[in-house]
Image (cartoon, rainbow, N blue to C red):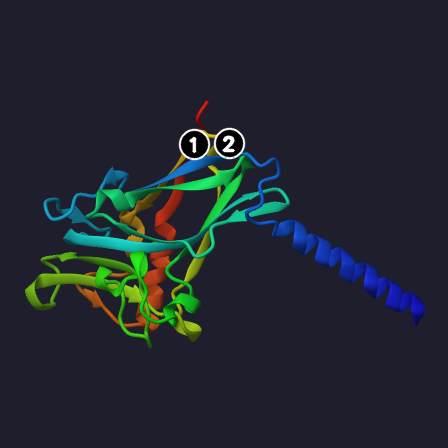
Amino acid sequence: MKTLFYLGTVLLCCFLNNVKAQHKNNKPENGKKGFVKIIFINTIHHQPVVLFDSSYRNPFGEDYTITKFKYYVSNMAFYRTGNRYSQKNDYRLVNQAIDSSLSFIINLPENKYDSIGFLLGVDSARNTSGAQTGALDPLNDMFWTWNTGYVMEKMEGTSPQSNAINNKVEYHIGGYKGENSVLHYLTFALPGNKPLIIQNGKTSTLIIEADIAAFWDAATVIKISETPVCSLPGTLAKRIAANFYRLFKVATVINEN
């Protein structure tokens, strides 16, 4: 019995030490800090999206224009072996119509990072926290009600193949509860095994691309002629969200010398 108790104690200590190592968040090891500029580029077939004035075609031969495209990114984290630096309570609304929303700067401890992650959407705690400000202000037109919460992603436009009023295309994808939650945490190894190098007082850059070309069939088929509108949480929103997750990749790492 004593042997089993001793073994259990050792295993528990090892587990706690491992957890501690994995979650030494926000503590620079040498006190030095630099910056990373995160740039989101929304594209279609790797060409920057142009709202209103450009026509695109999906894999099913359906033509469409985009008049609105925006989404939430939150809880961004930067990883290296045995450690993580996370941005808690940090919520960003990326809005194609507002240039200043497509990039932001984060302060990071000096180090080399080999992967990043972020949540697409707004975590459940903030969905139930009452009236909020900044990126989470309901005036940003990304909030339904206290019961259904924040919209993760919103894309609007028109298409001649749409049978909705005024040929509209409207995908308001949200839902944070239960089996129909669309919240999804993405992690990416940096391209070419090239680390993000943060040096004291310097600014490196990460470019993240969201290619809307994959929106229609990355995981499930979404045809405008069949489904031009989705504006409520549920199984359809979850299916469309599964495509949306697959739009993203880290395209470029630029380390300042």
Image height check: is 155 above or below 3?
above
Q: How far across and down, in percent of the image, does residue 161 sit?
A: 12, 60
Q: Earlier in the sequence, mark 2 or mark 1?
A: 2
Number of residue marks: 2
Q: How far across and down, in percent of the image, does residue 152 sit?
A: 32, 61
Q: Quadrant of residue 163?
A: bottom left
Residue ranking furthest to the bottom: 147
Q: Which mark is residue 136?
A: none
Q: Which mark is residue 197?
A: 2
Q: Nearer the viewer, residue 254 or 180?
A: 254
Residue ranking furthest to the left: 166
Q: Nearer the viewer, residue 156 or 213?
A: 156
At 88% from the left and 68% from the top, the residue drawn is: 4
Q: Callout 2 environment at 10 Å: few (<14), some (14 to 19), or many (20+)? A: many
The image quadrant where one finds the N terminus is bottom right
At 12% from the left and 57% from the top, the residue drawn is: 158
Can residue 132 be seen in this snapshot?
A: yes
Residue ranking furthest to the right: 2
Element class at badge 2? strand
Q: What residue is disc 1 on? A: 204
Q: Are the two marked residues, 2 and 1, in contact with CB atoms closer than 8 angstroms?
A: yes
Element class at badge 1? strand
| Three-letter amino acid code at the position of disc 2 | Ile
Q: How far across and down, in percent of the image, does residue 134 sit?
A: 30, 57
Q: How far across and down, in percent of the image, does residue 177 sit?
A: 41, 73
| Three-letter amino acid code at the position of disc 1 | Ser
Can residue 43 be seen in this snapshot?
A: no
Residue ranking furthest to the front: 31
Q: Quadrant of residue 236?
A: bottom left
At 27% from the left and 46% from the top, the residue drawn is: 101
Q: CA distance from mark 2 to mark 1?
A: 7 Å
